Image (spheres, rainbow, N blue to C red):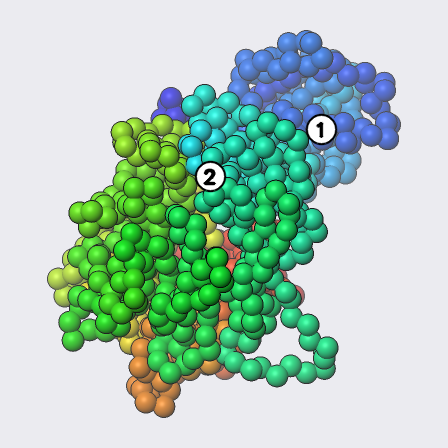
Amino acid sequence: MRFLTAFLLSSLIMPAVAEQDADSSPSPQAIDEVLVLAELPLSVDLLTDNAKADEIRRALVMQLDQGRMPAADRPVSLFGQSLHWQRQALPSEGDQGLSLWAVNLEVDRWVEGAFEIEALDDPALFHNGQSVKLSDGKAELTLAAGTHRFWLMHQGPVDGETPSWQWQGKSRQDSVSMHLEPAQRVSPELLTNAETVNWMAISPNGQRLALRSGGRIDSADLAWQRLDIRDLETGEVVRSWTGNPPSALAWSPDSQTLAVQEGDNLWLHPDNGEARLLLANHEKLGSWEWHPDGRSLIFAWTAPEEDPSDKRRRIRSLEDRWANFRDNQQLYQVDAASGLIRPLTGGETSVTLHDIHPAGERLLLSQRLIDYAEPPHSLVRLFELNLDDLEEQEIGQFRMLNGALFSSDGYWLLSGPGLPGADGATTGESLTPNEYDGQLYALSADGESARSLSRDFDPALNSFHRLPDGDLLLSATAGERSILVRFDARREQLSEVATGVEVMEQFVASEGRRVQVVVRGTDADAPQRVHHIDLARGDSEVLIDSREGPYADVRFGEVRPWQFINADGVTIDGRYYLPPDFDPEQTYPLIVYYYGGTSPVDRQFTGRYPFNLWAARGYVIYVLQPRGTVGYGQEFSALHVNAWGKYTADDIIEGTDKFLAAHDFVDPERVGNIGASYGGFMTMHLATLTDKFAASISHAGISTLTSYWGEGWWGYGYSGIASRGSFPWNNRELYVDQSPIYSADKITTPLLLLTGDSDTNVPPGESDAMFTALKLLGREVELVEFPGEDHWILDREKRYVWWDTMLAWFDRYLKDQPEWWNHLYPES
């Protein structure tokens, strides 16, 4: 059905007017057919001049719109009356009373113009659910490429006149197409507004599932959150919170009592009985979990820094630059029956809880120590706490510790390949392992010896959860995918668990004999789904599928895998996205995207760089995974260390050339490239090496390795792995020759630099330095800063401007369409 809809849409989107002479002024494009819902059961007399008229109209459109175009013959129930959306030709004088008209505008490029409405009584216009200002029946509009829903509410034709609704482009290029089909292209608003599950929890017995969801309704200017508890067997929602739902909840080990955190308060909700307040107004209450005996909870509680001076600040360590680093987090235990709290830890150094022993008598904890003696210039103390006498027993100190759990005869650890005293590295002496390539270890009970359990397993392990039988479930990076892995502790074997999603965002698992697992995640071309898996049986069912909700009418282009073998004989993974209406006989501009840092660009559906949106705007997107990333084995990831683009640039340049040679539907003269953070560094670095790109974008890119190493809050730590053993004083070749700023005079490609002006990871000075260099050199360069934003552009409205800025830059150079960029950033 979806393919049929896409076919109908491509067939029915026809120009509303005949082709005009190139020298003629644009003629109006009349809307000659609409979907109509009439007559609405509202009193026109009481609505006219009503103080709440605008709110009444907005409320109706909000309920009926739901982010989708109505379908012809779709019924609508209004005050007990059943009305149907009907196709109607315009002009028409048949509408009487209050009516709604709907039409889709399909736009293939940024356009500027106006809607002109004549001979309709009291018209109100809505664009994608939001009210549009009308002045004398005219609305000035600018529209980006995509599908635009317009609804027009009115009170019928003006007596004796024939109504009309038309689009008037500002110039000949500002033409649009019109259709009434529900099929649409994906939009920025849909990507940010559609309901998604952002957190999950499961009861120990596997019978209940908690899902916290969020979304946004633009027409109501409302961002919302909801938390539902479902019966996993029946699918029934047994409890729901809205407004300000709980920030966290967890069931007791017997699944009979639910602990619910609401702000700074923690409530207990027994299955039988009234809810009871356990912790009240505990400011800075942190993470918490039930003790295995079900009679108490262990929780983190933070004492914020108290600094009496606001005139100066002595930075006492590299970490002291971090926000909230001086806050002190300690652990406490609260008795569920009496509410008595007892401190478990103390001192000036924050404590983190990793695990509670299944028997309940011991906690596994860690503290971060200030120690820069060895890369990555951090140190973590792992220790046990006996709950009976609160005595500590140190297990060991580790430069890299990503997680720790109790095992039957010691501990499970997640760390890098180079864990001292272990056998995790497989790269030999010729390569330095990449410590971000997560490995699983068995650590002896005395902390003296560690043994690798994953050295022959290529996926990089990220987090883990212990099952009741002693096995482990782990999340892992496997090339472009994020997968679920089971570790059989008896056989010491790792194997992938089928989840039904390409990129797993979260998993939760029950504690009973038959383990129930729930995962949420996405595919490269499919939005979020939630899957329920019976681990023993291997059965799987879909609980939530966004393709049946907000994305039901959205048509996506195909996402295809594409690999190549580079000059060194190494297979380089990748994929490409096609526009929804892809025609292999046409040629398209190409955007090449990469990260190049230590993690791959996974196949998540959307994110900060929305490939499906770019494809919907008429681009082919090629995403590749150059050497140095984890998820492809240790030898592959080790090439990230002390390289800073040496292998990555070769793969991107060779991959782009080979992709162009293999795909004749891409125009080799219209190729752009973009990367962010380490990828932003790669964009600058590539610009010093090649002029094959017609336009380039660097977001939060690094122009000078030395300044990033010293100024970025995490620069020294990341460099401790990416530049292990190398410093500005002992490896001038790396820090100078691989820094793009020292080769800025070689850059000829138009370069757009983007940054948050409050970026603490890659400071904005990295973009400022390159902007200064290229301005002095007289090169084509632009710098756009986003006030108050850090390493990522999180503010919703600023994110729209950020996305628009990137696409407008590519439209300018890859489509010869500078109008959108000039509108966003006029020379004045």
Q: Where residue 314 sits in the image (x, y, percent)?
A: 61, 83
Split into 4 quadrants, where in the image is the N terminus? top left
> Badge 2, how many Cα within 10 Å: few under 14, some, many 20+?
some
Q: Secondary structure at mark 1?
A: helix
**Mark 2 vs mark 1: in front:** 2
Residue that numbered label 2 is attached to: 253
Specify the farthest residue to the front: 389
**Between 778 and 430, the one nearer to me in the picture:** 430
**Between 390 and 379, the one nearer to me in the picture:** 390
How far apart, in angstroms, are the residues tagged by discs 2 and 1? 45 Å
Residue that numbered label 1 is attached to: 59
Specify the farthest residue to the left: 569
Q: Is residue 53 above or below residue 607?
A: above
Q: Secondary structure at mark 2?
A: loop
Residue type at numbered disc 2: Pro
Q: Is residue 739 above or below residue 383?
A: below
Compare marks 2 and 1 and give the one earlier in the sequence.
1
